[in-house]
Amino acid sequence: MSSKKTNERNNKKSIAPTVLSALTIAPAIITAIEELMDKFPDVPGKVVIPQLSYDSEPRLKLDEAVMALTNSGLKAIPSELALKEADPKYKDCFDSQVVGSSLKGKQKAQAGMSVIVKYITQEVIDESQRLFEKAEEQKAIEKRVKAEKRELQVEQAQKIIVDVAVSAKDRFGKILPHRKHEITDSNNS
């Protein structure tokens, strides 16, 4: 009976490394298969995602992005950018402009897959412009404060230099008359 328990323990100990190595190898195998499938674009079911980001040219309106995704065999899910997502980088956007998507352009995806298309409204653009102007005002204030601080430092340095020069002049003025008398006394002797 004890030999049976020992065999069970040994079997459990020998299974653990096998399971562990299988778990560490599995992600690498999956990645290799995905890369291999990407190398064969003719495999049915894979489509290329069109470029939709806001910094790409041409900039797309929501309806153009939806049409591009639909023509590629993908489903578009429009998602309006929330007001709290306003950012100075959106200050030059136009109403209903696509500013991002859940999948990156030029990648391959399964046909029929849903892609979230983020677009911007005029309200968010206005808030983004306000944030930009506020940031620019803050930069101008900081620049002015820095210039005033630098000017004050220069004035303080000039005052110190003037004070040192006056002090040195006073000291030399006190030393030189004594030396003058010493020189005259030695010449008279």
Image (cartoon, rainbow, N blue to C red):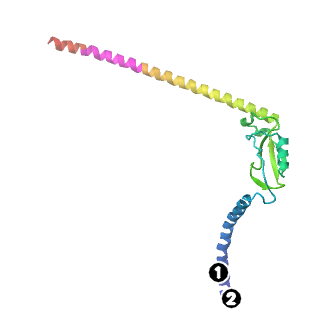
Q: Quadrant of the C terminus?
A: top left
Residue at 23% x, 13% y is 181
Res 1 label: 2
- The answer to whether residue 78 of the structure is visible from this angle is no
Disc 2 and disc 1: Cα gap in Å? Answer: 15 Å
Please indicate whether residue 149 sits to the left or right of residue 75 in the image: left
> Which residues fall within the magenta stretch?
163-179
Please state which amino acid type lies under the numbered disc 2: Met
Q: Residue at x 68, y 82 (%)?
A: 8
The residue most toward the front is 42
Q: Residue at x 76, y 37 (%)?
A: 86
State yes or no: residue 175 in magenta: yes
Question: Majority secondary structure of the magenta segment?
Answer: helix
Q: Closer to the camera, 73 or 13? A: 73
Q: Position of residue 2 (x, y in %)?
A: 66, 87
* Residue 133 locus on image (x, y percent): 71, 29
In the image, residue 108 sits, relative to residue 94, either above or below, namely below
Which residue in the rendered view is the most extreme toward the bottom? 1
Where does the N terminus fall, quadrant-wise?
Answer: bottom right
Drawn side of residue 79 relative to residue 176, left or right:
right
- Residue 10's disc is 1
